[in-house]
Image: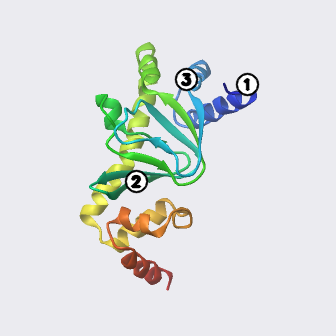
Amino acid sequence: MQGQPEYNKMKETIKLYFSNFLPLENSDLEMFAGKFTSKHFKKGEYFIKEGNLSSEIGFILKGCLVCVYNKEGVEFIDEFCMENEFISDYPSLLDNKPAEKDVKCLEDTELLVVKASDLNDLYNQKHSFERVGRIIAESLFKNWHQKAVSLMLDDAETRYKKLIKNRPTLPQRVPQYLIASYLNVTPESLSRIRKKISQ
């Protein structure tokens, strides 16, 4: 059970974030924020485990997470997620099927978490809450789409430049071999790219 001061602080964080781009009445923001709980994870712990049902959406207050697909013992990095971003296995949520990827904490992490079922209840109560759901879905989709397009059209150096432009602290927070996997290059190639950019 969360202490009341911590819970009130959490609710104010959610209200402040969504009030920046959602024309919700304060009472609606209060109702929305009340659906969230705070969860803390240690470095190396999982928010989502492959094979389990994913029933929650997280909003990252602090920390860095990595989304990983596993195939025959080989890891494929799908995405990194950091502060002020949403994290989930959205296909698992939509289809009510086991997650196909791991979502692992690369640092000690603090999340605000809401159950998908609670969001659906809000959508049914008021049309304004449906806009909240759309914004969450768009946020989850945006990063995936940007990476997919970049993998098709950009060379490795351009992909890396885009990555550090969008997440400038990532190289200091994530092992280089994980970034190389995300970019679909070898660690040696990434080292050459970083050296070239720094010159």
Q: Which residue is drawn at 60% across and 18% down?
A: 27
Q: Residues within 10 Å of mark 1 (few under 14, many from 20)?
A: few
Which residue is identified by label 1? 4
Above or below, comparing residue 71 to residue 20 in the picture: below
Residue 21: image location, x then y, percent: 52, 36
Query: Furthest residue to the top?
Result: 125
Above or below, comparing residue 141 to residue 151 in the picture: above
Q: Residue at x 37, y 35 (%)?
A: 52
Above or below, comparing residue 134 to residue 155 in the picture: above
Residue 99 vs residue 115, the one in the foreground: 99
Query: Furthest residue to the bottom?
Result: 199
Q: Which residue is drawn at 40% across and 42% down?
A: 140
Q: Are marks 1 and 3 in contact (CB under 8 Å)?
A: no
Q: Residue at x 56, y 49 (%)?
A: 83
Residue 16: image location, x then y, percent: 62, 35
Which residue is identified by label 3? 35
Q: Quadrant of residue 116?
A: top left
The amino acid type found where label 1 is placed reads Gln
Query: Furthest residue to the front?
Result: 73
Q: Earlier in the sequence, mark 1 or mark 2?
A: 1
Q: In which quarter of the image is the N terminus?
A: top right
Query: Furthest residue to the right?
Result: 5
**Mark-to-mark CA distance, 1 and 2:** 34 Å
Which residue is identified by label 2? 79
The amino acid type found where label 3 is placed reads Lys
Q: Quadrant of residue 131?
A: top left
Q: Which of marks 1 and 3 is nearer the N terminus?
A: 1
Position of residue 39 in the picture relative to residue 189 (left or right):
right
What is the secondary structure assignment of the residue under circle 3? loop
The amino acid type found where label 2 is placed reads Glu
**Mark-to-mark CA distance, 2 and 3:** 26 Å
